[in-house]
Amino acid sequence: MKSTPLYIISLIVLLMTSCKESSTSSFPYDIPEGQDPRNTTYYFLRHAEKDTSNPQEKDPHLTDEGIRRANYMATYFADKDFDLFYSTDYSRTIQTLIPIVHKFKGTIQSYEAQKDTLFTEAFWKETYGKNVLVVGHSNTNPKFVNEIISEEKYQDLDESNYDVFFKVEVKKDLSLKDSMITREVPEDFTYN
Protein backbone atom coordinates (compact mmCIF):
# COMPACT_ATOMS: atom_id res chain seq x y z
CA MET A 1 0.00 0.00 0.00
CA LYS A 2 2.77 2.46 0.88
CA SER A 3 4.51 1.85 -2.45
CA THR A 4 1.38 2.77 -4.46
CA PRO A 5 1.67 6.58 -3.87
CA LEU A 6 5.36 6.41 -4.74
CA TYR A 7 4.49 4.51 -7.92
CA ILE A 8 1.85 7.10 -8.87
CA ILE A 9 4.25 9.99 -8.22
CA SER A 10 6.93 8.27 -10.31
CA LEU A 11 4.43 7.72 -13.12
CA ILE A 12 3.35 11.38 -13.04
CA VAL A 13 6.98 12.57 -13.14
CA LEU A 14 7.67 10.21 -16.05
CA LEU A 15 4.63 11.49 -17.97
CA MET A 16 5.56 15.13 -17.32
CA THR A 17 9.10 14.51 -18.51
CA SER A 18 7.85 12.72 -21.62
CA CYS A 19 5.49 15.57 -22.48
CA LYS A 20 8.26 18.11 -22.05
CA GLU A 21 10.56 16.19 -24.37
CA SER A 22 7.85 15.77 -26.98
CA SER A 23 7.59 19.53 -27.34
CA THR A 24 11.01 19.50 -29.03
CA SER A 25 9.67 17.10 -31.63
CA SER A 26 7.06 19.70 -32.65
CA PHE A 27 9.73 21.45 -34.70
CA PRO A 28 8.30 21.21 -38.21
CA TYR A 29 11.44 19.99 -40.04
CA ASP A 30 14.36 17.61 -39.63
CA ILE A 31 18.05 18.39 -39.89
CA PRO A 32 18.67 18.78 -43.64
CA GLU A 33 20.00 15.65 -45.31
CA GLY A 34 23.79 15.45 -45.35
CA GLN A 35 24.17 18.13 -42.64
CA ASP A 36 25.69 17.74 -39.19
CA PRO A 37 23.67 18.98 -36.20
CA ARG A 38 24.23 22.74 -35.81
CA ASN A 39 22.61 25.64 -34.02
CA THR A 40 20.52 28.07 -36.08
CA THR A 41 19.60 31.52 -34.77
CA TYR A 42 16.97 33.86 -36.17
CA TYR A 43 16.36 37.49 -35.26
CA PHE A 44 13.12 39.10 -36.42
CA LEU A 45 13.28 42.89 -36.45
CA ARG A 46 10.39 45.13 -37.36
CA HIS A 47 11.15 47.97 -39.76
CA ALA A 48 11.88 51.29 -38.06
CA GLU A 49 9.52 54.28 -37.89
CA LYS A 50 7.87 54.97 -41.24
CA ASP A 51 6.49 58.21 -42.63
CA THR A 52 2.72 58.13 -42.11
CA SER A 53 2.06 61.72 -43.28
CA ASN A 54 0.43 60.49 -46.51
CA PRO A 55 -2.14 57.74 -45.81
CA GLN A 56 -2.35 57.02 -49.56
CA GLU A 57 1.36 56.08 -49.75
CA LYS A 58 1.62 52.28 -50.05
CA ASP A 59 5.42 52.16 -49.64
CA PRO A 60 6.51 54.92 -47.24
CA HIS A 61 10.13 55.60 -46.43
CA LEU A 62 11.59 55.85 -42.94
CA THR A 63 11.34 59.06 -40.97
CA ASP A 64 14.48 60.71 -39.54
CA GLU A 65 13.76 58.88 -36.28
CA GLY A 66 13.43 55.63 -38.24
CA ILE A 67 16.82 56.17 -39.87
CA ARG A 68 18.28 56.89 -36.43
CA ARG A 69 16.76 53.66 -35.08
CA ALA A 70 18.09 51.64 -38.04
CA ASN A 71 21.59 52.94 -37.34
CA TYR A 72 21.24 52.18 -33.63
CA MET A 73 20.17 48.61 -34.40
CA ALA A 74 23.26 48.29 -36.62
CA THR A 75 25.40 49.03 -33.56
CA TYR A 76 23.33 46.64 -31.43
CA PHE A 77 23.67 43.78 -33.93
CA ALA A 78 27.35 44.47 -34.77
CA ASP A 79 28.60 41.48 -32.76
CA LYS A 80 26.01 38.94 -33.92
CA ASP A 81 28.03 37.45 -36.82
CA PHE A 82 25.12 37.30 -39.24
CA ASP A 83 25.38 35.04 -42.28
CA LEU A 84 22.12 35.90 -44.04
CA PHE A 85 19.78 38.90 -44.29
CA TYR A 86 16.15 38.86 -45.40
CA SER A 87 13.69 41.68 -46.01
CA THR A 88 10.34 42.20 -47.62
CA ASP A 89 10.43 44.34 -50.79
CA TYR A 90 9.33 47.55 -49.10
CA SER A 91 11.37 50.73 -48.75
CA ARG A 92 10.95 50.82 -44.96
CA THR A 93 12.26 47.28 -44.40
CA ILE A 94 15.16 47.65 -46.80
CA GLN A 95 16.09 51.06 -45.31
CA THR A 96 16.04 49.49 -41.83
CA LEU A 97 18.34 46.69 -42.94
CA ILE A 98 20.87 48.71 -44.99
CA PRO A 99 22.99 50.02 -42.04
CA ILE A 100 23.15 46.50 -40.57
CA VAL A 101 24.03 44.80 -43.86
CA HIS A 102 26.66 47.46 -44.51
CA LYS A 103 28.51 46.53 -41.30
CA PHE A 104 28.63 42.89 -42.43
CA LYS A 105 29.21 43.61 -46.12
CA GLY A 106 26.30 41.28 -46.82
CA THR A 107 23.50 41.19 -49.35
CA ILE A 108 19.75 41.37 -48.83
CA GLN A 109 17.53 38.51 -49.94
CA SER A 110 13.83 39.20 -50.28
CA TYR A 111 10.92 37.19 -49.00
CA GLU A 112 7.24 37.55 -49.71
CA ALA A 113 5.25 38.65 -46.67
CA GLN A 114 1.86 37.79 -48.15
CA LYS A 115 2.51 34.04 -48.32
CA ASP A 116 0.39 31.71 -46.22
CA THR A 117 3.50 30.03 -44.82
CA LEU A 118 6.66 32.00 -44.14
CA PHE A 119 8.75 29.29 -42.49
CA THR A 120 9.02 26.84 -45.37
CA GLU A 121 11.22 23.78 -45.68
CA ALA A 122 13.22 25.58 -48.39
CA PHE A 123 13.83 28.52 -46.02
CA TRP A 124 14.89 26.11 -43.26
CA LYS A 125 17.37 24.34 -45.54
CA GLU A 126 18.77 27.65 -46.78
CA THR A 127 19.23 29.08 -43.28
CA TYR A 128 20.19 25.91 -41.40
CA GLY A 129 23.23 26.35 -39.15
CA LYS A 130 23.39 30.10 -39.75
CA ASN A 131 22.76 33.37 -37.89
CA VAL A 132 19.93 35.07 -39.74
CA LEU A 133 18.34 38.52 -39.54
CA VAL A 134 14.86 38.95 -40.98
CA VAL A 135 13.40 42.46 -41.22
CA GLY A 136 9.65 42.43 -41.51
CA HIS A 137 6.49 43.97 -40.14
CA SER A 138 4.31 44.19 -37.04
CA ASN A 139 2.24 41.25 -38.31
CA THR A 140 4.77 39.11 -40.22
CA ASN A 141 7.42 38.81 -37.51
CA PRO A 142 5.13 37.26 -34.86
CA LYS A 143 3.66 34.98 -37.54
CA PHE A 144 7.13 33.85 -38.64
CA VAL A 145 8.16 33.11 -35.04
CA ASN A 146 4.92 31.25 -34.32
CA GLU A 147 5.47 29.05 -37.37
CA ILE A 148 8.98 28.15 -36.24
CA ILE A 149 7.94 27.30 -32.69
CA SER A 150 4.71 25.60 -33.86
CA GLU A 151 2.69 27.60 -31.37
CA GLU A 152 0.43 30.67 -31.49
CA LYS A 153 2.42 32.43 -28.78
CA TYR A 154 2.96 35.93 -30.18
CA GLN A 155 0.34 38.39 -31.39
CA ASP A 156 0.75 41.16 -33.95
CA LEU A 157 2.69 44.11 -32.58
CA ASP A 158 0.99 47.42 -31.96
CA GLU A 159 1.52 49.77 -34.92
CA SER A 160 3.31 52.28 -32.68
CA ASN A 161 5.73 49.73 -31.17
CA TYR A 162 9.14 49.77 -32.82
CA ASP A 163 11.13 48.70 -29.75
CA VAL A 164 10.35 44.96 -29.82
CA PHE A 165 12.07 42.24 -31.80
CA PHE A 166 12.26 38.46 -31.55
CA LYS A 167 15.01 35.89 -31.27
CA VAL A 168 14.55 32.17 -31.97
CA GLU A 169 17.32 29.69 -31.35
CA VAL A 170 17.01 26.23 -32.89
CA LYS A 171 19.51 24.03 -31.07
CA LYS A 172 21.42 21.10 -32.58
CA ASP A 173 18.81 18.69 -31.20
CA LEU A 174 16.00 20.87 -32.72
CA SER A 175 14.91 22.11 -29.30
CA LEU A 176 13.79 25.72 -29.33
CA LYS A 177 14.34 28.84 -27.29
CA ASP A 178 12.37 31.94 -28.24
CA SER A 179 12.34 35.38 -26.72
CA MET A 180 10.84 38.79 -27.26
CA ILE A 181 13.39 41.55 -26.69
CA THR A 182 12.73 45.24 -26.05
CA ARG A 183 15.43 47.67 -27.09
CA GLU A 184 14.82 51.43 -26.99
CA VAL A 185 17.08 53.84 -28.84
CA PRO A 186 19.00 55.82 -26.19
CA GLU A 187 18.23 59.54 -26.30
CA ASP A 188 21.91 60.39 -26.63
CA PHE A 189 22.53 58.01 -29.56
CA THR A 190 24.02 59.68 -32.63
CA TYR A 191 25.44 58.27 -35.84
CA ASN A 192 27.50 59.48 -38.79
Image: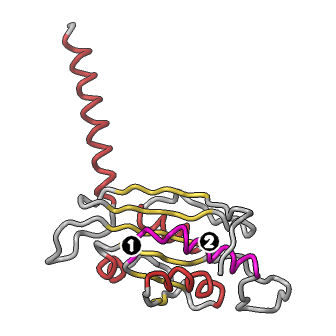
In the rendered view of the protein, which quadrant contains the C terminus? bottom right
In the rendered image, residue 131 lying in the magenta stretch gets the answer no
Expressed as whole percent of the image width and height from the top left, the position of residue 128 reads 30, 74
Give the residues drawn in magenta, as a range: 64-82
Name the residue that disc number 2 marks. 72
| Label 1–label 2 contact, CB within 8 A | no
Whether residue 176 sits left or right of residue 139 in the image: it is: left
Q: Residue 149 sits in which quadrant?
A: bottom left
**In the rendered structure, which amino acid carries the disc numbered 2?**
Tyr
Residue at (72%, 64%) from the top-left corner?
188
Q: Nearer the viewer, residue 84 or 143?
A: 84
Q: Nearer the viewer, residue 40 or 79?
A: 79
In the rendered view of the protein, which quadrant contains the N terminus? top left
- Residue 52 versus residue 161 in the image, above or below: below
Question: Dot 1: few (<14), some (14–19), or many (≥20) neighbours within 10 Å?
Answer: few
Residue at (31%, 36%) from the top-left corner?
16
Name the residue that disc number 1 marks. 81
Expressed as whole percent of the image width and height from the top left, the position of residue 97 reads 56, 82
Q: Nearer the viewer, residue 29 or 49?
A: 49
Question: Dot 2: few (<14), some (14–19), or many (≥20) neighbours within 10 Å?
Answer: many
Whether residue 74 sits left or right of residue 66 in the image: it is: left
- Residue 59 versus residue 124 in the image, above or below: below
